[in-house]
Image: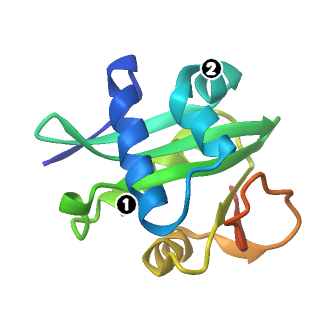
Amino acid sequence: MIEIVNYQPQYAPAFRELNKAWIDQYFVMEDSDRKMLDDPQGYILDRGGAIIIALKDKTPVGTCALIKKEDGVYELAKMAVSLEAQGQKIGWKVGLATIEKARELGADTIYLETNSVLKPAISLYYKLGFMEIDGYDSPYSRCNLQMQMKL
């Protein structure tokens, strides 16, 4: 059974490793990644954001962050599911929980940045209700696709 919980400090290593795994598989770690993954409390939570963790048998297998950009606008970032847990709808569950958390935080807009090589992720984002857009400045050299959802 999958349990969706809010981030707690004991999940910091899992948040880092789950994200490092997919970044290393497809890209290279960038300064923006390191800042966020090395200090999720300071970079995400203390600035008004949130992190969702998916647990399977009490073990973190998925995660997603909401980064507050300005009042009402949040970035969905650092969504990851462990290789062993992929194919079990964990990304869907984490995505839905993250969108609900954004609503609780008062978001009216959620955007994300991704890369066109991440086809399963992009398919998930469309299913969750995101649409392609242009216009946000990206801190990532790997970003070639932006998507947005109005709540």
Q: Residue at (47%, 53%) from the top-left corner?
A: 79
126 sits left or right of 69 in the view? left
Q: Position of residue 62 (x, y in %)?
A: 33, 49
Q: How many marks?
A: 2
Identity of the residue furthest to the front in this view: 28
Q: Of marks 2 and 1, which one's residue comes earlier in the chain? A: 2
Foreground tag (2 vs 1): 2
Q: Position of residue 82 (x, y in %)?
A: 28, 55
- Judging depth in this view, the residue of 122 and 3 nearest the camera is 122
Q: Position of residue 89 (x, y in %)?
A: 28, 65
Q: Which mark is residue 91?
A: 1
Secondary structure at numbered mark 1: helix
Q: What amino acid type should be assigned to the residue bearing mark 2?
A: Gly
Q: Does 111 sit above or below residue 19? A: below
How crowded is the residue under tag 1: few (<14 C-alpha within 10 Å), some, or many (20+)?
A: many
Question: Which residue is disc 2 drawn over?
Answer: 42
Q: Does 129 sit above or below residue 47? A: below
Would you identify the image quadrant in which residue 9 lies? top left
Q: Residue at (59%, 24%) from the top-left corner?
A: 45
Q: Residue at (84%, 71%) from the top-left corner?
A: 134
Q: What amino acid type should be assigned to the residue bearing mark 1?
A: Gly
Q: Position of residue 143 (x, y in %)?
A: 70, 66
- Judging depth in this view, the residue of 149 and 53 nearest the camera is 53
45 sits left or right of 134 in the view? left
